[in-house]
Amino acid sequence: MSTQDQIFREFLETYNRIVEECFHRCIYSFNYRYLLDEEVDCVTRCTSKYVNYNQRMAMNFADIQAKKLINMQEQVEAQSQMMNNEINDNSKSS
């Protein structure tokens, strides 16, 4: 599965969880063809809450991943510098 497909799949799973959760929380009357005003307000608040939460989580995840990447790059650079120093020391002693 390609990365793009996986991202789309995760988006759909998140969307479906939000729809299901907000439906169960907010929709309580099946007597009418349309939603009641209270149900519309509840769904609006519920979806807004979950979308905002999901965006904050994604931003935090991106920040953590960026910090990990920087840390890994610093470690690779440090190891490379150590290897260069060892090579230089060995060539000087020969």
Image (cartoon, rainbow, N blue to C red):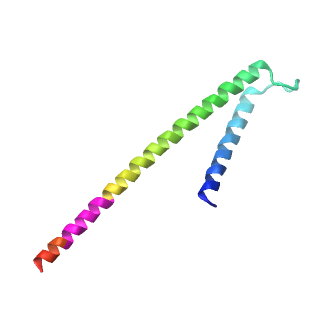
Task: Please state if 46 lies on the left or on the right of 40 as rendered.
Answer: left
Check the image and name the residue furthest to the bottom.
94
Q: Quadrant of residue 55?
A: top right
**Quadrant position of the N terminus in the picture:** bottom right
x%, y% of residue 63? Answer: 44, 43
Part of the protein shown in magenta: 76-87
Q: Residue at the location (80% across, 20% down)?
A: 36
x%, y% of residue 15? Answer: 68, 41
x%, y% of residue 79? Answer: 28, 63
**Quadrant position of the C terminus in the picture:** bottom left
Q: Is residue 86 above or below residue 37?
A: below
Task: Please state if 35 lies on the left or on the right of 51 as rendered.
Answer: right
Which of the pair 47/30 is nearer the observer? 47
Number of numbered labels in the structure image: 0
Q: Residue at the location (37% across, 51% down)?
A: 70
Q: Is residue 52 above or below residue 73?
A: above
Q: Is residue 80 magenta?
A: yes
Task: Please state if 65 lies on the left or on the right of 23 as rendered.
Answer: left
Check the image and name the residue furthest to the left.
93
Which of the pair 63/22 is nearer the observer? 63
Q: Is residue 93 magenta?
A: no
x%, y% of residue 81? Answer: 24, 63
Q: Residue at the location (75% across, 23% down)?
A: 39
Q: Residue at the location (61% across, 54% down)?
A: 4
Q: Quadrant of residue 44?
A: top right
- Main SS of the magenta part reads helix
